[in-house]
Amino acid sequence: MFIVTAKEMYDIDKFAMQEIGLDGKLLMENAGRAVAEKITAMSSKQEKICVLAGAGNNGGDGFVIARTMMDQGYHIHVLQVVPDSKIRGDASFHKRIYENCGGSLSLFDGIDGTEVLDADIIIDAMIGIGVKGELREPLLSLVSLINQQTKKVISVDVPSGLPADEGTVEFSAVEATYTFIIGAPKISAFLNHTSPYYGTWELVSIGLPKKAFQLSTSKSIWNETNVRDCFPGRKPDDHKGTHGKGLVIGGCTEMPGALSMTLKAALRAGAGLITGATSEHVINRIASTNVEATYAVLSTTDGFINNDSKVNVQDYDAIALGMGMGRKAFTSELVRDVVSEANCPIIIDGDGLHHIQPYLTSLKRRKSPTIMTPHPREMAMLLGANVNEILVEPFRYASEFARKFDVYLVLKGMYSIITSPEGKQSVNMTGNPGLAKGGSGDVLTGIILAMIMQRQDMFDAICNACYVHGKSADLLIKHQHSHHDLLASDVIDGIANVYRTIS
Ligand SMILES: NC(=O)C1=CN([C@@H]2O[C@H](COP(=O)(O)OP(=O)(O)OC[C@H]3O[C@@H](n4cnc5c(N)ncnc54)[C@H](OP(=O)(O)O)[C@@H]3O)[C@@H](O)[C@H]2O)[C@@H](O)CC1
Ligand SMILES: Nc1ncnc2c1ncn2[C@@H]1O[C@H](COP(=O)(O)OP(=O)(O)O)[C@@H](O)[C@H]1O
Ligand SMILES: [K+]
């Protein structure tokens, strides 16, 4: 499923109309009908429905919805929120057809919201991706009135007033119960501060050609179909070497669990052989519960690993670096040496990100892929930015960072964004607040480590790992646990449930 900015959506519409020959009025008819079908499935003919129609194409969708539902016997009234003189283009065409069919219509006088107050369901077709700046009056007051109601509010394409793109903090917008998104989800459906306005959302297709999307956007949602299409299989003659020999470097006296979870998650996710390189003390603490792993002892200072004992990094197919290693200056040397000496893919996570921050440009010299897995606070640290800036524009920051330093980036969060060094981006939709607990990220790193050692493309492998991680948590919440009690170690055990459903 593609994800678009407003500009990309306009480019796609333009391509569909000018290159393919689809008429704009037809696309509007398709959009309105597709949304009407969804709304009829969730409403009754006894309910009073008020369609709020604006002047642009979003309003045009509203007129098609109103006509389609009116013909099916629904109790529909259109409240036009702009004067007649403003209604333009295809919206004007569909308004005329609605009126010719005898549809009920009144003009919003800018003061009285009786139609809104009387309705059981409000359909918000005032403004879509064409919003510019903050809402003007009288729409601003109308939106405030709508948001004070407890009725079902169904937005068409985008909740009116909400920017389709990232980067805007100041806005007033409809707080929808449901949004039926047209053609492709817009970026604002995936940002922490804007996604709640959509309520529950669903995509409706209106016949825009796939080719138009492929030419216009490199952003998409990584879903179960993507996973099934590229999930690595196992052959009868496979041996442990086939599934990769991975090294995990991290841990310290105060944080032995981080390393332990990464080791276990990597093994559970399918790695052939996993070695934990850490202090003797950490090994003594975790070895009895990680019996399948092997270990390499690293020398330490005050319980933190230092660079005195060399790890033979050339012996491994992939390395994960950083989990629970602490931030002592002498550990930085170890991180830098591993990153520059290893010829295999490296995942840098947790404290490893802090150690590599002053040396980010060195990553460009690596011949093998580098994968970085920051949460927003770590991303802010890497960029020397404020965390709120990252949260408001995560797609842009992630894309610029991945391109600049030639890395695969997993910017973790409610919707993690996976970016390739070329700027291709996927959003992972699995996962839930049960994962908001220490250790979840260490588990993800282990799964990524296992996945990138299987037979699959690097970007696909990372996306698959994020999917499996979140899906494990989702299945556990559905069947065994709650958001409150889920532990990172449960997520490791839950990998089995995911694998059983997809492999
Ligand atoms: N083929 C297609 O293109 C298809 C497009 N489709 C649909 O079209 C939608 C995009 O349509 P669009 O481009 O006409 O813009 P739209 O969202 O209706 O907004 C423009 C209106 O909003 C107003 N307005 C803006 N800012 C404002 C503010 N701050 N405060 C107040 N008013 C403000 C602006 O007023 P103006 O500033 O011009 O006075 C103008 O009247 C898209 O989301 C989808 O639903 C589907 O039918 C499928 C086919
Ligand atoms: N509310 C949430 N919804 C979905 N996934 C979440 C949520 N909270 C956290 N996660 C996921 O859990 C993981 C947390 O990683 P991180 O913050 O590094 O944890 P830690 O450092 O404690 O191990 C990430 O993969 C993130 O995407
Ligand atoms: K809308």
Image (cartoon, helix red, strand yellow):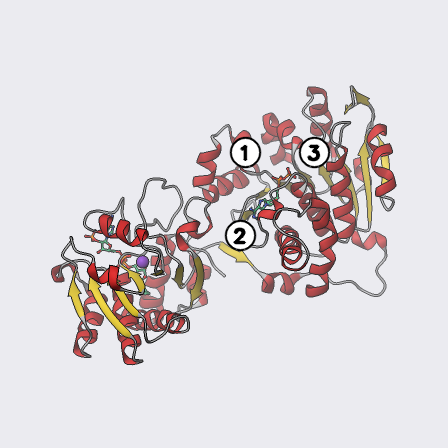
User: Does the residue tagged 2 have its C-beta within 8 Å of any atom of ligand 2?
Assistant: no
Q: Which residue is mark 2?
A: 427
Q: For residue 347, what is the image quadrant?
A: top right
Residue 452 seen in the current view: no
Residue 498 seen in the current view: yes
Q: Which of marks 3 and 2 precedes in the sequence? A: 3
Q: Which residue is mark 1?
A: 377
Q: Secondary structure at mark 1?
A: helix
Q: As shown in the figure, which amino acid type bears the numbered disc 2?
A: Val
Q: Which of marks 3 and 1 precedes in the sequence? A: 3
x and y, in percent, of residue 190 in the image = 47, 50
Q: As shown in the figure, which amino acid type bears the numbered disc 1?
A: Arg
Q: Nearer the viewer, mark 1 or mark 2?
A: 1
The front one of 388 and 149 is 149
**Residue at coordinates 40% horizontally, 45% vertically from top-left?**
166
User: Does the residue tagged 1 have its C-beta within 8 Å of any atom of ligand 2?
Assistant: no
User: Does the residue tagged 3 have its C-beta within 8 Å of any atom of ligand 2?
Assistant: no
Which of the four quarters of the rendered structure image does ligand 3 lie in?
bottom left
Where 290 falls versus 471 (above or below)? Answer: above
Q: Which residue is mark 3?
A: 322
The front one of 464 and 110 is 110
Q: Which of marks 2 and 1 precedes in the sequence? A: 1
